Image: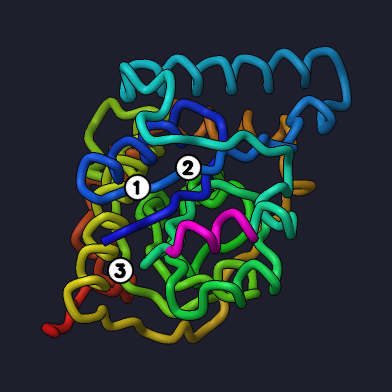
Amino acid sequence: MRAIVLTSALRRHMYVANSLASRLEVACVWREQKAFDPLKYAASDEDACVIRLHFADRDASEEAYFTGATGVGPPSRQVAAGGCNDPDEIAVMRRFEPDVVLVFGTGLLKRPMIDSFPGRIINIHLGLSPYYRGAGTNFWPLVNGEPEYCGATIHFLDAGVDTGPIIAHVRPDIRAGDGPHDIGNKAIVAAARALGDAALALGAGGVDAVAQTGEGCVYKRADFSAAAVRRLYTNFETGMIANYLRNKAARDALLSLVVMKGRRA
């Protein structure tokens, strides 16, 4: 199973790329620079401090969870934000003749890139589609007091915002004492495994996917704010996780989730 991986440049992205390379023939990894600058949403110096601390804690947590992911093993190409849509980069991708294109953390991929690999692009969306789509979709469930909606969606990529047919949902094993970044990183670990499973199933005869139905929340980067960060930490401090764990079975039962089903060749 020959794959290429389109991802970004943070430690989490290197972890996923290396996890995939340990199970698949990864011919090349595209590492796209991030364009998100959270400090642009700070309205004051105090807001800026809140945001800096949140992202510093994220980086420290990723370093703990993804120790050793300081680079990628397969050959890689570094591109600017949005660079995976560049026609020259698409031409290079096509020359590798991948059986599957695996995506995690790039900017929005556009129609020319998607049409170059029909039915062969599988994406990790960090969030449970269709409940939470768009940006920060393991951040907003915690802001909204809904940790049961944290997780990841493995889906075939289409031109919409996290709207492609779903192969599988995965969720973190939330425990007492977990903070927001623990939950997010556990979701990434589960998603990396599930993405590899989906690629292998595709190569072994195919994988079933379920069309998305229903409406959910769609968040944009511009929705991010220091006020939302404060609300997130207030939820943790006031017992959100303990309350969820006390009522876990009932709350989880309200979700309709997809389990991966491969097809034999």
Q: Is 44 above or below relative to 171? A: above
Where is residue 146? Give x, y as percent: 44, 52
Residue labelled with disc 1: 26
Furthest-front residue in this view: 95
Question: Nearest the camera: 263 or 230?
Answer: 263
Q: Is 94 contained in the magenta span? A: yes
Part of the protein shown in magenta? 91-97
Q: Amino acid at mark 1?
A: Val
Q: Please state if 169 lies on the left or on the right of 45 as rendered.
A: left
Q: What label does residue 168 carry, if any?
A: 3
The tally of labels here is 3
Q: Is 59 above or below relative to 261? A: above
- Tell me the element at label 2: strand
Q: Nearer the viewer, mark 1 or mark 3?
A: 1
Where is residue 148? Give x, y as percent: 35, 55
Q: Amino acid at mark 2?
A: Val
Decide which of tag 1 and tag 3 comes sooner along the chain: 1
* Whether residue 251 can be seen here: no
Identified at 45% across, 14% down, the residue is 60
Decide which of tag 3 and tag 2 comes sooner along the chain: 2
Identified at 56% across, 31% down, the residue is 9
Q: Characterize the local packing of mark 1: few (<14), some (14-19) or many (20 or more) Cα atoms within 10 angstroms.
A: many
Q: Is 193 above or below relative to 200? A: above
Q: Is 7 contained in the magenta span? A: no
Q: Nearer the viewer, mark 3 or mark 2?
A: 2
The part of the image, by quadrant, that contains residue 119 is: bottom left
Identified at 27% across, 83% down, the residue is 208
Residue labelled with disc 2: 29
Q: Main secondary structure of the magenta part?
A: helix
The part of the image, by quadrant, that contains residue 72 is: top left
Q: Characterize the local packing of mark 3: few (<14), some (14-19) or many (20 or more) Cα atoms within 10 angstroms.
A: many
- Tell me the element at label 3: strand
